Every structure is written in C-alpha cells, then in structure tokens.
Amino acid sequence: MSKVVRLPKFWVLAIGQGVLVVGTAAVWFYVRTVAYLAGPPDPDTYAWTWGFQLMVFAVVWLPAILLCVGILLAFERIALGPYYRATALREDRHEG
C-alpha cells in the first residue's frame, strides 16, 4: 500500500489564513481606492491614479499585513505546538 502524503493541519490552516487575509486586504484596497478617487481632487495629481495607489499598497500595506500575519502564525504555532505533536504521535500509533 502506498502511503498518502498530507500537509500537516497547521500548514493547511496557515495557508488558508494567509489567503483569507490577502483577499480581505485586496477588497479593502479596492474600496478605499474607489472612495479616494471619487472624492474631491487632490493637489497631488500623481497620487490620484490607480497605478500609484496600487504601488503604495504593494510596497507599504501588503508587506505590513503579511508581516503581521506571519507574526500571528508564529505565535499560533508556538501556542499550538504541543497539540500538533500529540496529534502526530496519535496518528503514527494508529498507522503502525
């Protein structure tokens, strides 16, 4: 019998959490940018374009959001480490 290789549950949840946060940040960027561009003209005409807003989001906001999610995932991994180790030991005993 071939053994099925699965990702650990933590990594599946971590990837899901990352995708959810990036998706939420993209929606936030879109809503915020539409509101800004619909407002009264800004004296800084270069800032009143989708390209500039996307660049600021990609350079400033997205890395900050990903850093915060990474720190949160590190705390989750540390806090839930004993649970994941116990689950892995239980699964190994049942397979053997």
Image (tube, rainbow, N blue to C red):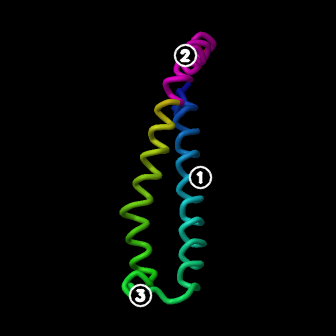
Amino acid type shown at disc 3? Pro
Which class describes the residues within 10 Å of circle 3: few (<14), some (14-19), or many (20+)? few
Q: Is residue 17 above or below residue 43?
A: above
Q: Earlier in the sequence, mark 3 or mark 2?
A: 3
For the residue pair 61 and 3, the one nearer the viewer reads as 61
Residue at x 54% of width, y 79% of height? 36
In the depicted structure, whether residue 10 falls above or below residue 39: above
Q: Is residue 90 magenta?
A: yes
Quadrant (top left/top right/bottom left/bottom right) for the N terminus: top right
The quadrant the C terminus occupies is: top right
Element type where label 2 sits in the image: helix
The amino acid sitting under disc 2 is Pro
Task: In this rendered view, identify the residue nearer to me: 92 or 37.
Answer: 37
* Residue range highlighted in magenta: 76-94
C-alpha gap between disc 1 and disc 3 = 35 Å
Could you say which disc has been placed on residue 20 in the image?
1
Magenta: main secondary structure equals helix
Residue contact between numbered discs 1 and 3, judged by CB atoms under 8 Å:
no
Could you say which disc has been placed on residue 43 in the image? 3
